[in-house]
Structures are given as C-alpha cells and as structure tokens.
Amino acid sequence: MKIMALTAASTTTITTLLISLLFLPKFYSSELDSHTSIAKADVDLLEFPLNLEFFEAEFFLYGALGYGLDKVDPNLTQGGPTPIGAKKANLDPFTRDVIEQFAYQEVGHLRAIQKVVKGFPRPLLDLSKESFAKVVDAAVGKKLSPPFDPYYSGVHYLLASYLIPYVGLTGYVGTIPKLQAPTSRRLVAGLLGVESGQDAVIRAYLYEHAHEIVEPYGITVAQFSNYFSDLRNKLGHEGVKDEGLWVRKSEGAEGKIKGNALAGDADSVAYDRTAEEILRIVYGSGDEHKPGGFYPKGGNGNIARSHLH
C-alpha cells in the first residue's frame, strides 16, 4: 500500500512538472525578443548604439583605407545609404596603423551587436569636411579660415576622432544599469572596454602634443580639446560630463593635477549619458527632436525615431 501511495504521489508530481514545463516557453516568450534570448526591454537599448558604431566604423575605415563598410562588409549596413563626404585622410604610417585597427574593431562591434539583436539599416551620415568644420566653428565660437578639415593631417584627424569614441563610451556607461539580461550587460561591458581603450589612445596622443599649435589657427591641441568638450557639455544640457586635456587643478584627479589624459568625475569614475543626450550632441542641435550635423535625417532605431515624430 505504501508503495502504491508513493507511486501515485510521484505520478502526480511528474504530471504537474510536465504541465509546468509545457507552459514555460509561452511564459517566457512574452519577455524575450524573437531574434535571440534577451529581454525585450533590452532590445532598443542595445540597438541604439549602432548609430554611433556605424559612425565610427565609417569614419575610421575611410580615414585609414579610403573606403567603408560597402566594401569591407556590406551586409552589416542592411542597405543603409553610403556616407556623405568621407575620404582617406593624410595620415603618417603610425597613425594610419592605429586608425585601421580602430576601424576593424568597429566592424566587429557592429557584428557583435547584430548577432544579439536584429539592428537597423545604417543611417545617413555626413562625414564631409564641411560637416566637421561646422562643428569645430560652433566649438571655437567663430568661423575658422581655412575651414577645419579632419582629413588634412594626422593631428586634424585625431582631433576629429576626439569627437567620437568618448560620446559612445559615456552612452555605454549610462546603458549598463538599465539592462536586464546578463547577456546584454556582458555585451555592452565588452564594447565599453574597447571604446574606452580607443578614447584613451586618442587622448594620450593628443595629450603628448597638447601644447602644439594647430596651424594656421593659432590654437593649441589642448585648447581645441577644451572647446570640443565644452560644446558637448552645452549641447547635452546635463552639466559637466566632458573634460578637455587640461583642466583647473581643482578639477583634476583628486584636485591635485591639471593634466587630464583621461576624463572622469570627482572620483575619477567615467561619466554617463542617456540616448537623448547623445542625440543632442551628434545632431549638433542640442535637441533630440531636431536632426542635423552628422545625422542629416536623424538616427535609426526605435529610440532615435521616437523623438522625430
């Protein structure tokens, strides 16, 4: 009798477990994206950075090689339009080698994100010298003559590059706390690590040349970096989240030094930015609802497009 009771109880338990397992996929399917196994709430947050990754990949590829994703890996573009005005930069061998490394790293970033989420077509990017010149004029507060050309020399190109990875890395810092799935957090943490490395390399090079004057403007490399950082703070509308290569001693690490090879808050922790702050900056308008600048028609993806309607 005891054996029969045990068997009946076991049968009931097994039946209950089987029924539960039957309904598990339906329960989780409402919380997961059909493209992969990450939480739906993470999808838009993971797709948004593609806007900047496309920017970086195209700028670095063209700068080093004279061509972009349309030749290197057209599938990653998902049919998006070819960038406007991008071209090969006049770089010394060392700088070209570093930028080429950055370029292929960005190709990997695009692929890594698109392995996890569907993504979207490459947005229209204006990487022309005229586009960069407008940003630089806005930062300096006057129209430079001749107009700033990022492709003119290694220093010019690296100053233009100063505008890119740092914005992306602050976005990743701001995104990680919002992500639900461990897979999503691992991906973004990995992207953040390399983006931070790129920014550090660019800043270290510029820091070495901080006191050199960029001809014919009579402005030092450090002054340009401060102008660019001040502009991004102004456009972001969320206080100081950007710092140039030289700061007041009270603003340096532990309030003890003026040199600022890496930007960080009072505790030397990286700043964070929201998607909206990033759009305000890369549009050059200070308004996530008004595209322009490097993104004439705005960014792609649900987050960016939601601000355009």
Image (spheres, grey):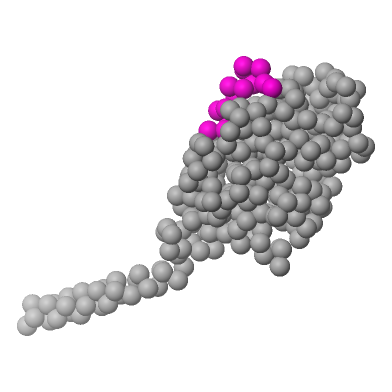
Residue at screen point 69% across, 22% down: 90
Q: Quadrant of residue 16?
A: bottom left
Whether 112 is drawn above or below 263: the answer is below
Q: Residue 201 in the image: x percent, y percent?
A: 65, 27
Residue at screen point 67% across, 21% down: 91
Quadrant (top left, top right, bottom left, bottom right) of the C terminus: bottom right
* Residue toward you, 52 or 187: 52
- The furthest residue to the right: 142
Q: Is residue 245 left or right of residue 16?
A: right
Residue at screen point 70% across, 55% down: 298
Q: Residue 110 in the image: x percent, y percent?
A: 53, 44
Q: Residue 80 in the image: x percent, y percent?
A: 58, 51
Residue 97 on the magenta span = yes
**Magenta-drawn stretch, dominant element (helix, strand or loop):** helix
Residue at screen point 6% across, 83% down: 1
Residue 20 on the magenta span = no
Whether 270 is drawn above or below 289: the answer is above
Question: From which residue to which does the magenta span run?
Answer: 90-104
Q: Is residue 266 visible?
A: no
How many numbered badges does the structure rendering display?
0
Q: Is residue 273 left or right of residue 211?
A: left
* Residue toward you, 117 or 269: 117
Q: Is residue 152 visible?
A: yes
